[in-house]
Amino acid sequence: MKYIEKLRNSGLRPTKQRLQICEVLFDTEKTFHFTINELNQKIKNQINNKISLATIYNTVHAFEKKGYLKQIPINSNQTYFDTNVSHHHHFYDLKDEKLIDLENSDVGPINILKKINGKKIKSVEVLVKLED
Amino acid sequence: MKYIEKLRNSGLRPTKQRLQICEVLFDTEKTFHFTINELNQKIKNQINNKISLATIYNTVHAFEKKGYLKQIPINSNQTYFDTNVSHHHHFYDLKDEKLIDLENSDVGPINILKKINGKKIKSVEVLVKLED
DNA sequence: CACTTGTTTAGAATCATTATAAACTACATA
DNA sequence: TATGTAGTTTATAATGATTCTAAACAAGTG
Ligand SMILES: [Mn+2]
Ligand SMILES: [Mn+2]
Ligand SMILES: [Zn+2]
Ligand SMILES: [Zn+2]
């Protein structure tokens, strides 16, 4: 199974629950954005199985640490994650509270001129807030 | 007093507590970033008075709504605010968990090419994560 | 001053997230 | 294949930032 490698790379044994989480996260045509609660619902519907929140949190965080998921920097009462781990940006629709992908090509090249001594840039993310 | 106008514009009466919050927020040479807890500490030290958290939350949110404070989009267990309401961006030092201003001129012009039907851009914010 | 409406506050409620620890499982090794 | 150990799952509790509540209090008006 293709997900075993992802799990092992993340330092996790391939258990039934984790493989099911992988199916929901990665066995899709399109990438998507989600909160832990939304993922939990999706698992219940799609896999027709309940996985404890603790396992979901742990697995998502392990993937995020390894770079198989991204956290989206946004102020919300819940943390948003993204299965699209390519370098890209986001619209945030303030009214609908929805995220929309902004491909790298939809945003011009970004050149950070300021340097901080002894630090290097890990990521550059643009958040574009939308209103009506 | 110069803060009375800010308060009235935000739909708030100028009370003793709110004026003291204003002093801490706006009576400074430099702008700064803060969490509610940090602001609470600052008030205790600087004004030598305790103001209830409810009042601090309410006042900060009223100012944020009116545009006298900005919320910084970042994933943290606490919400970060900024007294610098000019259009600017941020470095986020992952190790020290500190925010650093990135002036508009430190980032090239950003051109959002994608348009969303019926929505207009309210803000464009760049977050640059730093590692060692 | 008297009245109304807005404000402050302590404490409770909420709720996303993290911690705990007991029952269970993967899997290496005998 | 059987056994042992380290890792995993789960229900449940704890944590902690934020929001809510409602009673005591203050601002502003006439
Ligand atoms: Mn998280
Ligand atoms: Mn807030
Ligand atoms: Zn995305
Ligand atoms: Zn700033």
Image (tube, coloured by chain):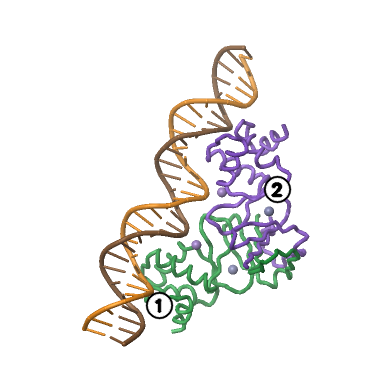
Chain colours: A purple, B green, C orange, D brown
Of residues B90 and B131, the one drawn nearer to the viewer in this rendering: B90
For residue A96, side relative to residue B24 (left or right) = right
Q: Name the residue under label 2.
A: A31
For residue B13, which numbered disc appears in the image? 1
Same subunit, tags 2 and 1: no
Q: Residues within 10 Å of mark 1 (few under 14, many from 20)?
A: some
Residue A129 image point, x, y percent = 63, 64
Q: What element carries label 1?
A: loop
Residue B116 image point, x, y percent = 70, 63
Whether ligand 2 has any atom under 8 Å from the Cβ at mark 1 is answered as: no
Residue at 66% across, 64% down: A128
- State which chain disc 1 sits on: B
Residue B117 image point, x, y percent = 70, 64
CA distance for labels 2 and 1: 48 Å
Residue at 67% across, 49% down: A32
- Residue D11 position by quadrant: top left
Residue B73 position (above or below residue A9):
below
Residue A47 image point, x, y percent = 62, 35
**Quarter of the image with the C terminus of chain B in it:** bottom right
Does the CB distance between marks 2 and 1 fall below 8 Å?
no
